[in-house]
Amino acid sequence: MNIDTFKTTSKDQKKFIDSNAQVVIWDGGRGVGKTCAGAIKAIRSTEKQKKGVIISDIRKTIIKHEFDKWTPANKTQRFLLDQFVLNNTQLLILNFSEVEQRLRGLDISWIWFDLINVHQFSEMRATIFRRLRSEVSVWITTLMYGGGVVEYATLKDFLAFYGRV
């Protein structure tokens, strides 16, 4: 299997992967392919040499498995502790508690939060989003409420909807 043979398993998965919105949130049930979709989106971004950060407290091995599964055979990849290099593009995989300190000064194009909970979402809104450059894309996969895929054209629209804390 690789990204070239990937077929989406649902409308929500396709919408999340194909979204061009600056902020896209997929709030779906357990086992519906959210982490797979995030990995596909990340792999595609490396093809454009876009650096990113993946935030996940408990799922680093699952994320690495998805990258192994979907990375094309002719593309080089390697994992070094919390760093993943694909297509000569560095990705970081961080725990939620590391984010605020480690995001400072990073030049990234996107950030993906995998399976954040309600408490982390509130904290993220209050701290992390204020530190992001206005053009950084934000992807969130969660199972808080099961509300499907929601898109916001800009980070400003997203923050206006959820409010700054």
Image (cartoon, grey):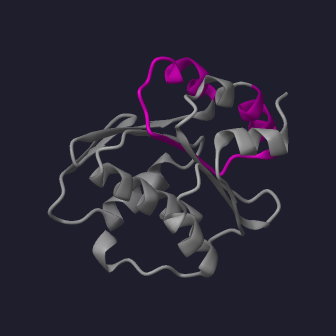
Q: Is residue 66 left or right of residue 94?
A: left
Span shown in magenta: 97-126
Q: Is residue 107 visible?
A: yes
Which quadrant of the figure has residue 56? top right
- Toward the left, the furthest residue is 74
Question: Residue at horizontal 35%, vertical 43%?
Answer: 50
Question: Residue at horizontal 58%, vertical 49%?
Answer: 22
Question: Residue at horizontal 36%, vertical 56%?
Answer: 43
Q: Looking at the picture, does residue 131 appear above or below residue 120?
A: above
Q: Position of residue 1 (x, y in %)?
A: 30, 76
Q: Nearer the viewer, residue 64 or 153?
A: 153
Q: Is residue 121 magenta?
A: yes
Q: Is residue 80 magenta?
A: no
Q: Is residue 32 visible?
A: no
Question: Residue at horizontal 81%, vertical 40%?
Answer: 160
Q: Position of residue 153 (x, y in %)?
A: 64, 52
Q: Position of residue 63 (x, y in %)?
A: 46, 54
